[in-house]
Amino acid sequence: MAESSGVMAYAEASKDKLTTTTRELLGIGRNLANELGEPLCAVLAGDGVSSLADEAISLGADRVYVIDDPLLKEYLSDSFTPVMERLAAEVSPRIILLGQTDAGRDLAPRLAFRLKTAATLDCVDLTIDAASKRLQATRPVYGGNALATFTTETDPQIVTIRVKAFSAATADASRKGEVIKAEAGLEPAAVRTKVLDRIVEEVEGLKLEDAAVVVSGGRGIGGAEGFKQLEELAHLLKGALGASRPPCDNGWVSELLQIGITGKIIAPDLYLAVALSGSSQHLSGCSGSKNIVAINKDPEANIFQAATYGVVGDWKKVVPALTEKIRELTSG
Amino acid sequence: MNMIVCIKQVMDPETPPASFKIDPQTNKVIPPPGIAPVPDPYSEYALEAALRLKAENSGKITAISLGNDLLRDVVKKSLAMGADELILLEDEAFAGGDSCSTAIALAAAIKKIGEYDIVFCGRQAADWGASQVGSGIAELLGLPCLTLAQKVEATDGKAKVEVVTDDGYEVVETTLPAVITVSNELGEVRYPNIKGILKAKKKEPIIWKPADIGLEASEVGAAGRCTKLVKLFQPVREGEAEIISGDTPEEAAVNLALKLREIKLI
Ligand SMILES: Cc1cc2nc3c(=O)[nH]c(=O)nc-3n(C[C@H](O)[C@H](O)[C@H](O)COP(=O)(O)OP(=O)(O)OC[C@H]3O[C@@H](n4cnc5c(N)ncnc54)[C@H](O)[C@@H]3O)c2cc1C
């Protein structure tokens, strides 16, 4: 392998556009590349992805490797690992960045073991150590109770970034870059897995990850009925409904509404946390929120450590009055 | 159906945040006094998935735990829940590893066990949560790997697995043998029953040292790490919330609404 150089970002698309996470990847990727004084390249691997190369360039990539192959229509580790292995061997990047997404979290470790290097997943901070020029990757550990910074001595240094933890690159259509077509070189026999079905669960209203306001309930809500009231408030604030784990485990709300280390990672402007205690596992998914407002009957609840504002009281009394007042303030 | 389940011993993840302390000198977590370690909850989902398959297809479940100073009460819970065999990779040399050195040791042990259809791991561990050991074992043994399973069915050398995605799930088929990592969406994990607890009491684990699985002490644990921990620290919280009060909860709610309006959040 030639001496490693440059940063490679694994781009993902949805509905013919690069995803928000990909824009975040290109944002931090550009910063790291500048600091190293080396190029940033993007990889577009999929079926019918060629048209997105220009968008990747406008977002900061100096070079885009396009691997367009019908065999890459859907993500499978068995097909994407050898494709990325081949490209990494050809390009010898110093760093490979992926999103902590369905594909990225599966691909990164696979690729790291394949390339005899190491991966660090779900990073919230990435810096280049001035002396060694090595990547320092920081991620939450112990259910969000602590943060740990790791380095590795082998290249490529592979990391996934936590969604919403880095600022997205802004597009500049005047940027120039090079588009390089690469072969997948995939042996169909090497793919031992097959997607039989894909079930998308429709969640009503605004998507949790995109909402500027999230109203979230915990175990103290007590049942599905209570969540109806929170949903009404969320609706009024043009926001989305969320939950801690117990309401999801108990079937009061969909599992897709779970916020936390094993659920969604969100960073809204306003996070209204109702009758949830603020466990480290939960806070790990919402501590990026600009403002956390807590309603809890227990003044000692840990959520008040993370919140900017709080009301101590029974949500059954607080939420209806709050909803009514907000309706009054926001109407007309 | 022969199944292997990798189960880690971890600090209790339900330890109250106030009891969580770090020693900045050693970059280590100080074990909270009076709070005993537990089997990693994600590993228990992996065991539960294996137990459900066993109930349907019969077969044998071998649990493996790796570490140093493994508490018998903790690691034997797998036997009490219904695993048939327990292997401990227990040695000072196994301590302080990362996903890389852990996967190398587990893969070597699995190779030694020899016969298996499915290797189950948790999606991540509740302590370091690196989320890579399952994928690593698969790479080292040349097996397919499905991550974040919420349901597993297996017949005729194949498994049909529901894997959790961001907006629902996918049904994926894989050839066997394979590695499957299991997520909490699998649903409730069983409690050991009396019969299981008694069985576990009588059964002694098999203990393997690095040499028993064909590895040098320098290839496992802290010595075999691929990543270096530079720093372990606690996030700074910005202090306590401003409590909005009122004579009644309803009045506090009104004051909160006014405050949110004042700072233009609504
Ligand atoms: C490995 C692992 C992963 C986990 N992942 C996640 C995750 O991703 N997301 C997550 O959320 N959790 C997760 N958990 C669970 C987590 O540890 C906590 O158990 C959970 O977050 C607690 O949820 P809660 O705050 O709703 O419930 P509780 O901790 O029971 O808190 C309920 C709160 O409601 C308050 N309350 C009760 N009644 C009222 C009332 N009438 N009015 C006002 N307040 C009231 C109480 O004062 C209390 O503070 C995980 C746990 C483990 C072990």
Image (cartoon, coloured by chain):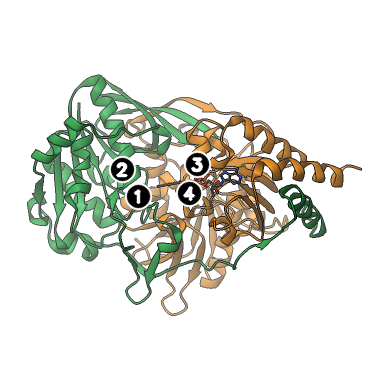
Chain colours: A orange, B green
Would you place residue B185 above or below residue A280 in this image?
Answer: above
Q: Is residue B88 left or right of residue A64?
A: left
| Measured Cα–Cα span from mark 4 to mark 1 | 11 Å
**Are the numbered discs 3 and 1 placed on the same chain, yes or no?**
no
Residue A161 percent location from the top left of the image: 51, 55
Tell me the subunit letter for badge 3: A
Where does the C terminus of chain A fall, quadrant-wise?
top right
What amino acid is labelled 2 in the image? Ser
Mark with earlier residue (4, 3) = 3
Question: For numbered disc 1, what is the local secondary structure?
Answer: loop
Q: Is residue A31 left or right of residue B171?
A: right
| Measured Cα–Cα span from mark 3 to mark 1 | 17 Å
Q: Would you name the residue on which mark 4 appears?
A: A261
Give the residue at x 63% y 35%: A227
Disc 4 residue: CB within 8 Å of ligand 1: yes
Give the residue at x 86% y 43%: A328
Question: For numbered disc 4, what is the local secondary structure?
Answer: loop
**Are the numbered discs 1 and 2 placed on the same chain, yes or no?**
yes
Q: Nearer the viewer, mark 3 or mark 1?
A: 3
Residue B187 percent location from the top left of the image: 40, 32
Q: Is residue B22 left or right of residue A211?
A: left
Q: Would you name the residue on which mark 2 appears?
A: B43
Residue B180 visible in rendering: no
Disc 3 residue: CB within 8 Å of ligand 1: yes
Q: Nearer the viewer, mark 2 or mark 3?
A: 3
What amino acid is labelled 1 in the image? Ala
User: Dots 1 and 2: beta carbons under 8 Å?
Assistant: yes
Residue B45 visible in rendering: yes
